[in-house]
């Protein structure tokens, strides 16, 4: 009877740890992690023997398996990806990609001590808002400004400051819900404000707001309906008129702009949205907007407006809980500075570059990538050039699309497409597209680094159909 392989044919953990092949693993990942990985592959080898596998793996093979396991575990799930979804500001992919200037500023702030709350002129305590307050006022025309963690925090802080235990008046047509469980009624409740809804879903008139005003009113609210449009028989009170009503009643008007842009988007062929400067000029006492949507910076929330309201906001203890750190502050300052020279934004700010990118340019890139992808995928997939529509994302301009181009991959059956999408996501630098019309679409609008893309694809490992 031939000898069956037994556990005794496998090396011990200590033998594996002493093997020459293991030294680089210990060097790279440390003794403890290497030991755990070797234990795991030995356990797997024993299981294989129990299943009746006839060839116990060699030391070489065991160490190679451990090495793969360690590399996989060490890989960050936050590693850079290719966003080929056609959604420029994809919330689940981290929204805006930062400008080089912002990356450098953030890196410098990480590396060294900075005068975050320290006045270099006097040697006394300074304020963290000082670094960007003037810049924000310059770019928006507002009297005063502050920064918090994100726009949700900005809205929460404004409401809590102005309407804790008081009433907040808002149109029924503007009670938004945006992704990530931001619902206006819930935020109001958490801010301590009593929500007073006025008007109807499709129509709200000046008299509706006027009728709701009373001595308990803390704030009037206008909310940009970022991610939807109410169309047809509609009426809303525009920002200017609402500001006049608020002024008459000596009540602050808070205008939540959501995305908020500092430039006229029609320069990029998009629909014109009111800029922050225009919204401030319309008379809202407070305007809030995001840092990582159309602005193209890091996650942040800006509050700009009248000094009197901002002084109150800055006194609110909640402000301390919502503040931003030096790294982001440095990146915000560098990003905002780019807006001093709008003519060169497209060159310097990835968000602006991608929004402005011409269809012909993207189509030419798609033509260059066609053979590369077809070559990697082989015979069981068909790759074609296609026109498609990109979106801004993050709820900004939900109905406006930008003509784009890319590659569409078709396969026999949905399972094969799902396998392909999974293999692309498993790459060292994941490639993320979207499934449409029985195909996997890669919209190339946001593809900057073509050489890196080609190199990444060459590592694609397609499991065979089962
Ligand atoms: C996106 C958005 C917010 C939340 O902004 P974050 O920066 O994501 O916190 C709030 N209000 C409106 C209208 C928005 O579009």
Image: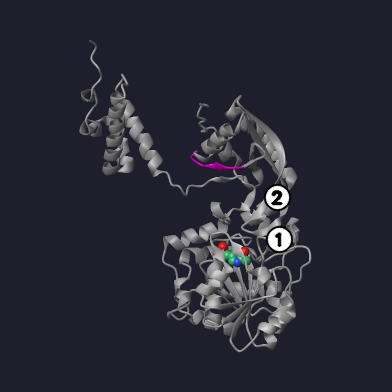
Left or right: 231 as drawn, with respect to 95: right
Residue 58 appears in the picture as rendered? no
Which residue sits at x=44%, y=72%?
Answer: 321
- Disc 1 marks which residue? 343
Determine crowd level at label 2: few under 14, some 14-19, many 20+ residues with C-alpha closer than 10 A. some
| Majority secondary structure in the magenta region | loop
Determine crowd level at label 1: few under 14, some 14-19, many 20+ residues with C-alpha closer than 10 A. few
* Extent of the magenta region: 427-434
- Disc 2 marks which residue? 357
Indicate whether 44 appears above or below 351.
Answer: above
Which residue sits at x=68%, y=49%?
Answer: 390
Left or right: 360 as drawn, with respect to 446: right
State which mark lies toward you, 1 or 2. 2
Which picture quadrant has residue 347?
bottom right
Question: What is the spatial separation of the Cα atoms under label 1 and label 2, in whole angstroms?
Answer: 15 Å
Task: Look at the image and tell me in which quarter the N terminus lies.
Answer: top left
């Amino acid at each position: 009877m031939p000898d069956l392989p037994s556990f005794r044919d496998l090396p011990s953990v200590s033998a594996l740890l002493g093997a020459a092949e293991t030294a680089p693993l210990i060097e790279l990942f440390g003794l403890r992690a290497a030991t755990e990985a070797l234990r795991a592959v030995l356990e797997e080898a024993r299981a294989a023997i129990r299943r009746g596998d006839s060839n116990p793996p060699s030391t070489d093979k065991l160490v190679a398996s451990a090495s793969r396991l360690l590399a996989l575990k060490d890989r960050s799930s936050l590693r850079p990806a290719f966003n080929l979804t056609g959604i420029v500001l994809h919330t689940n992919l981290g929204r805006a990609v930062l400008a080089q200037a912002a990356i450098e500023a953030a890196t410098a702030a990480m590396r060294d001590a900075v005068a975050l709350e320290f006045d270099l002129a006097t040697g006394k305590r300074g304020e963290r808002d000082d670094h960007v307050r003037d810049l924000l006022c310059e770019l928006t025309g507002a009297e005063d400004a502050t920064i918090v963690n994100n726009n949700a925090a900005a809205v929460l802080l404004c409401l809590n400051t102005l309407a804790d235990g008081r009433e907040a008046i808002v149109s029924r047509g503007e009670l938004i819900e945006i992704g990530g469980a931001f619902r206006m009624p819930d935020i109001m409740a958490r801010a301590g404000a009593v929500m007073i809804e006025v008007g109807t879903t499709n129509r709200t008139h000046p008299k509706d707001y006027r009728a709701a005003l009373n001595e308990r009113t803390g704030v009037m609210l206008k909310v940009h309906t970022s991610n939807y449009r109410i169309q047809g028989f509609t009426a809303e009170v525009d920002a200017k008129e609402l500001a006049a009503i608020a002024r008459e009643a000596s009540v602050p008007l808070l205008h939540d702009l959501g995305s908020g842009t500092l430039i006229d988007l029609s320069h990029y062929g998009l629909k014109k949205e009111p800029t922050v400067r225009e919204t401030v000029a319309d008379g809202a006492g407070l305007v809030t907007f995001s840092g990582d949507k159309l602005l193209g910076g890091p996650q942040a929330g800006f509050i700009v407006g009248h000094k009197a309201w901002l002084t109150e906001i800055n006194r609110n203890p909640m402000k301390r809980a919502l503040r931003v750190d030096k790294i982001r502050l440095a990146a915000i300052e560098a990003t905002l500075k780019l807006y001093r020279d709008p003519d060169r934004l497209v060159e310097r700010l990835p968000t602006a570059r991608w929004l402005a990118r011409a269809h012909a340019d993207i189509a030419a890139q798609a033509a260059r990538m066609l053979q590369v992808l077809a070559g990697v995928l082989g015979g069981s997939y068909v790759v074609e050039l296609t026109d498609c529509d990109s979106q801004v994302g993050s709820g900004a301009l939900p109905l406006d699309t930008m003509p784009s181009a890319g590659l569409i991959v078709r396969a026999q059956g949905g399972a094969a497409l799902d396998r392909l999408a999974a293999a692309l996501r498993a790459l060292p630098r994941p490639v993320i597209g979207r499934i449409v019309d029985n195909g996997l679409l890669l919209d190339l609008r946001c593809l900057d680094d073509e050489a890196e893309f080609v190199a990444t694809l060459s590592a694609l490992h397609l499991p065979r159909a089962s």
